[in-house]
Amino acid sequence: MVPVIPCSVHVLYVDFLFSLLAVDEVCPPDWDGLICWPHGSPGLVTKVPCPSYIYDFNHKGHAYRKCDVNGSWVFVDRWNKTWTNYSECLRFLQPNDEDGRQEFFERLYIMYTVGYAVSFSSLLVAIFIIGYFRRLHCTRNYIHMHLFVSFMLRAVSIFVKDRVVHSSAGLQDFDSALLDNLKTVSMAPLDKSQYIGCKVTVLLFIYFLATNYYWILVEGLYLHSLIFMAFRSDSRYLWGFILIGWGVPALFVAVWAIVRATLADARCWELSAGNIKWIYQVPILTAIGLNFILFVNIVRVLATKIRETNAGRYDTRKQYRKLAKSTLVLVLVFGIHYIIFVGMPHTFEGSSWEVRMYCELTFSVYCNNSITAQISSQLIFFNLATENMFKSAKDVILS
């Protein structure tokens, strides 16, 4: 296998060769934070394909740099940056798109803002109810509270991300550069401190997104334990669930942040950086896969018991209709739909991506958050009834 030489090492090596050969009229190789630029010929424009590891880029386009006659890259004094033309790469991200994508994203923004605001309010009411009535203080409802808080923090992180990422000074310069006649932008400014705030915001957004699915996994583990195991509602188990729900996501999100800062430290980290995203998406998929196994096992056993209990007595279509409704709701609550969307490629071509965005928004915001709040609120108000239900279900399954 041929070893892969990092770009920085390659640039230093070529610079060393140029110094030995006394080649002064050729622009040296350079790394701008996104692209490893080759040497440039004096007076000519160097063209490099847009980096494929950033999925939000137009991968059919090219980035451009110009080498002046003195053998140095053209430098823009008023920006204090090397001139680089990324306009073709940023075609999908520019505000004035010929296909009306700006209006489409504005509609999506309004939809998810309203959805998350309503979800946040309903979850806040549910948390107040649990905290106010001491009768509802138990392990199961504590788990519900943590799930509610994770959804609320996810909503807050989205609002903050929209505010910080798209209004930070660095990105205002970025957007104004797009409207400039040169259509130029430097993705690796000299001072990266201006991006620290928005990077932290994106990091927290990914963390709270991950905690959503791990607390859904905790809900599945708890429900499965109540039905199939001699499980005690003890505070010791609650601390273990807290470690799973909040601690495990912190580990792999921290790893993602370190890798992202090392290999693709561009802008506010809001652009997809190729396969780096799998550092946090694989653990999320693992949690959803485990939840799906628990879900299928519960539905399988309950369906078998319904068929055995009602065999030869009367028509069981009503029971199966109830089971089907519960199954459809649990598919949304358990986040099973996320497997479908995360496996689909990110593309801006055609109309399929618009359908995907609408579907993902509907499932993630309106169905997942609202249904979770409604179902868990019902579990709160009928706390004693559900205790008896779980005990009865366990007795039936173990009989």
Image (tube, rainbow, N blue to C red):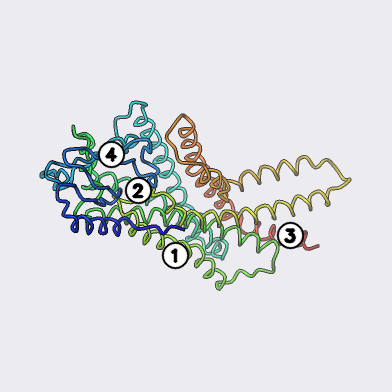
Q: Is residue 8 visible?
A: yes
The reply, left or right, for residue 294 in relation to residue 16 is right
Q: Is residue 124 visible?
A: no
Residue type for callout 3? Ser
Residue type for callout 1? Leu
Q: SS for tag 3?
A: helix
- Rounded to the nearest whole Å, what is the CA distance between mark 3 and mark 4? 70 Å
Residue type for callout 2? Glu
Question: Does label 1 or label 2 sit earlier along the sequence?
Answer: 1
Classify 10 Å Cα crowding around label 4: few (below 14), some (14-19), many (20 and above).
some
**Residue 151 or 286: which is nearer the viewer?**
286
**Residue 395 or 132: which is nearer the viewer?**
395
What residue is pinned by disc 4?
47
Question: Does label 1 or label 4 sit earlier along the sequence?
Answer: 4
Contact between labelled residues 3 and 1, with CB atoms less than 8 Å apart: no
- The numbered dot on residue 251 is 1
What residue is pinned by disc 3?
392
Q: Quadrant of the C terminus?
A: bottom right
